């Protein structure tokens, strides 16, 4: 807005100066270059008349009584004025007139928030991850204010009912207009250099607010710390952690000899497909336990792993469930849902793409002692197979057919989709974890055959939300599922429903050993006996709670 006003001002000053100067030249020419007396006898024509003729000429509205001109210099002057008028019009139309009219008739975007607006998050500016962040804030009923310097974008956001002000996030005065002093946090997400400037401006306003800065280049993190950021988020590193987490989440068992994984009791993963009968239901409504005699002990969704998942968790496309049961039950579940069932185990992993995301995945796999093969289009340290991932021979050379999991960490969404198709052709059963840059690419990647897709915008947006909401850190890598076998005298005589084990401890009873037999088909009315040995699954903390409460 300020830039447009300056342009209008400069244009008006130029026009006024141009008219005055050319009017003086015209007046001189008429008096000294045109043949015959000027002005005609009996008339008095001042410099104002010359200004009128100049204005008529450059605006093409007419020439008055002076036309036609007899001298060559005056005709050339009028021709010059004609051309100048046309040129000024076409220059002013896109640069001055259209923006001015658009501004006059466009939505009036606020430039400040009310003083009573408090405990909000100031977001600078609107990006795909800002949209994810706003979704997280809305789900927690936390207010926000978008600070958007682009007037047209701010107007569009305002028309879409976003809480937005048209202001410069690098200006301390404009951040005060966003009531930053009363905010709970500020998020700077423009570019690495601009974000540092925003952090400095925020610290000029207040030292108390939590400041989160988004940095694409990890080597610049220290500068944002020096500027005053409380948290520096590196989106691609977060995405790598999220992809690796799907592979590195571990199952720790203490079952003894009587229950052997792969015989009486199995652990597997099932991906929820869009056309699955599970899709669209909540975990409770799906009644998986009673219908298929399997237990859901964990779920991965959008980079987050929950054990156990809440019963009101909606089963959506892109969710992967960790289930337990006997082989026959798992086969029934696969047949009913049309989904792939992958036996839980950590064999070799193929990592495709060795940029910042792929390197993060590789480092975390190495830390978890998981064997992996790295594929990249460039030959560099750490790369095992060099080649284009969209060429079948490259993925064949990486031996994806025998891999337990394939992680596609390629930044190009089209290449990721095509590589997904190739992997699915080579091995329909391997777990395929893929990266996406934007949320729009996620459905296509699932359609191509991926089991699990994380978008850069989703992961970074949710991670920022966890920082500004002071929640537990999203995408932590150390999430494991522990499965133990123990007696529970405190539950003798109770049914699984009346014991409310899941509600009380967060654990799930997935099997019961009784009289030398392992029972995995457990209805809610199943009654526990004192000598039963329960197979319980949950996080380490939840299992400890169960042992303290019932054993």
Image (tube, rainbow, N blue to C red):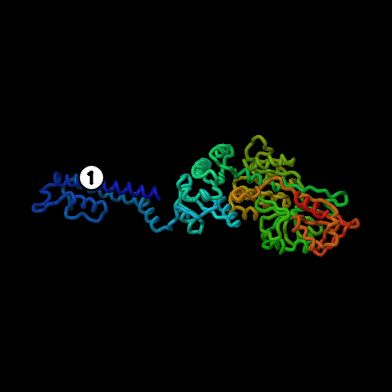
**In front of the other: 161 or 349:** 161
What residue do we see at 30% from left, 49% from top? 12
- Taking the image as drawn, is residue 201 in sight? yes
Which residue corresponds to the image point at 50% horizontal and 41% vertical from the top-left?
Answer: 200
Quadrant in which residue 296 is drawn: bottom right
> Which residue is depicted at the point 64% across and 35% down?
380
Image position of 225 with respect to 280: above or below: above
- Which residue, given by chain and number where applicable, does mark 1 sit on? 21
Q: Is residue 66 shown left or right of residue 186?
A: left
Give the farthest residue toward the right: 515
Element at badge 1? helix
Question: What is the total number of numbered labels drawn onto the structure image?
Answer: 1
Q: Is residue 527 left or right of residue 459?
A: right
| 144, 153: nearer the viewer | 144
Give the image location of residue 379, x and y in percent: 64, 36
Counting from the top left corner in percent of width and height, residue 387 is at 65, 40
Q: In front: 340, or 196?
A: 196
Q: Residue at x 71, y 54 (%)?
A: 299
Where residue 251 appears, as percent x and y from the top left, is 77, 48
Within 10 Å of disc 1 (Cα), the crowding (few <14, some 14-19, many 20+) is some
């Amino acid at each position: 807005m300020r830039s447009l006003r300056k342009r209008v001002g400069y244009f008006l000053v130029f026009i006024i100066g141009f008219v005055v100067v050319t009017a003086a030249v015209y007046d001189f020419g008429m008096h000294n270059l045109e043949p015959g007396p000027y002005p005609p006898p009996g008339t008095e024509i001042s410099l104002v008349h010359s200004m009128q003729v100049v204005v008529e000429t450059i605006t093409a509205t007419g020439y008055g009584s002076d036309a036609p001109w007899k001298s060559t210099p005056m005709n050339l002057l009028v021709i010059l004025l004609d051309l100048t008028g046309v040129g000024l019009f076409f220059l002013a139309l896109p640069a001055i007139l259209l923006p001015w009219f658009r501004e006059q008739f466009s939505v009036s975007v606020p430039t400040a928030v009310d003083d009573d607006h408090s405990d909000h998050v100031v977001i600078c500016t609107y990006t795909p991850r800002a949209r994810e962040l706003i979704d997280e804030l809305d789900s927690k009923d936390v207010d926000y204010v978008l600070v958007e310097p682009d007037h047209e974008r701010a107007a569009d956001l305002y028309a879409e009912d976003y809480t937005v002000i048209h202001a410069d996030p690098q200006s301390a005065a404009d951040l005060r207009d966003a009531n930053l002093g009363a905010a709970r946090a500020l998020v700077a997400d423009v570019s690495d250099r601009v974000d540092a400037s925003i952090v400095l401006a925020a610290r000029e306003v207040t030292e108390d607010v939590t400041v989160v800065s988004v940095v694409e280049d990890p080597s610049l993190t220290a500068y944002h710390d020096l500027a005053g950021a409380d948290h520096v988020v590196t989106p691609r590193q977060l995405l790598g952690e999220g992809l690796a987490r799907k592979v590195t989440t571990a199952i720790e068992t203490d079952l003894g000899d009587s229950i052997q994984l792969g015989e009486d009791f199995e652990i597997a993963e099932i991906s929820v497909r869009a056309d699955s009968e599970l899709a669209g239901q909540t975990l409770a409504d799906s009644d998986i336990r009673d219908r298929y005699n399997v237990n859901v002990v964990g779920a991965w969704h959008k980079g987050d792993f929950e054990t156990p998942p809440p019963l009101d968790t909606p089963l959506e496309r892109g969710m992967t469930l960790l289930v337990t049961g006997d082989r026959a039950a798992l086969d029934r579940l696969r047949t009913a849902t049309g989904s792939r069932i992958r036996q839980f185990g950590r064999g070799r992993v193929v990592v495709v793409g060795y940029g910042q995301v792929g390197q993060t995945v590789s480092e975390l796999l190495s830390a978890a002692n998981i064997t992996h093969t790295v594929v990249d289009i460039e030959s560099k340290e750490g790369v095992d197979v060099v080649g284009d991932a969209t060429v079948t021979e490259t993925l064949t050379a990486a031996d994806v057919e025998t891999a337990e999991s394939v992680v596609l960490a390629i930044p190009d969404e089209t290449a990721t989709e095509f590589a997904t198709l190739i992997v699915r052709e080579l091995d329909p059963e391997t777990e395929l974890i893929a990266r996406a840059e934007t949320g729009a690419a996620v459905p296509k990647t699932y359609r191509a055959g991926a089991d699990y897709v994380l978008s850069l915008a989703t992961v970074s947006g949710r991670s920022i939300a966890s920082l500004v909401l002071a929640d537990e850190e999203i995408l932590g890598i150390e999430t494991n599922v522990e499965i133990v076998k123990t007696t529970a005298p405190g539950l003798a005589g109770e049914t699984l429903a009346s014991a409310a084990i899941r509600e009380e401890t967060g654990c799930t009873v997935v099997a019961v050993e009784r009289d030398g037999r392992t029972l995995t088909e457990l209805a809610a009315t199943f009654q526990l006996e004192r000598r039963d040995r329960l197979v319980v699954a949950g996080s380490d903390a939840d299992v400890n709670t169960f042992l303290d409460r019932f054993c």
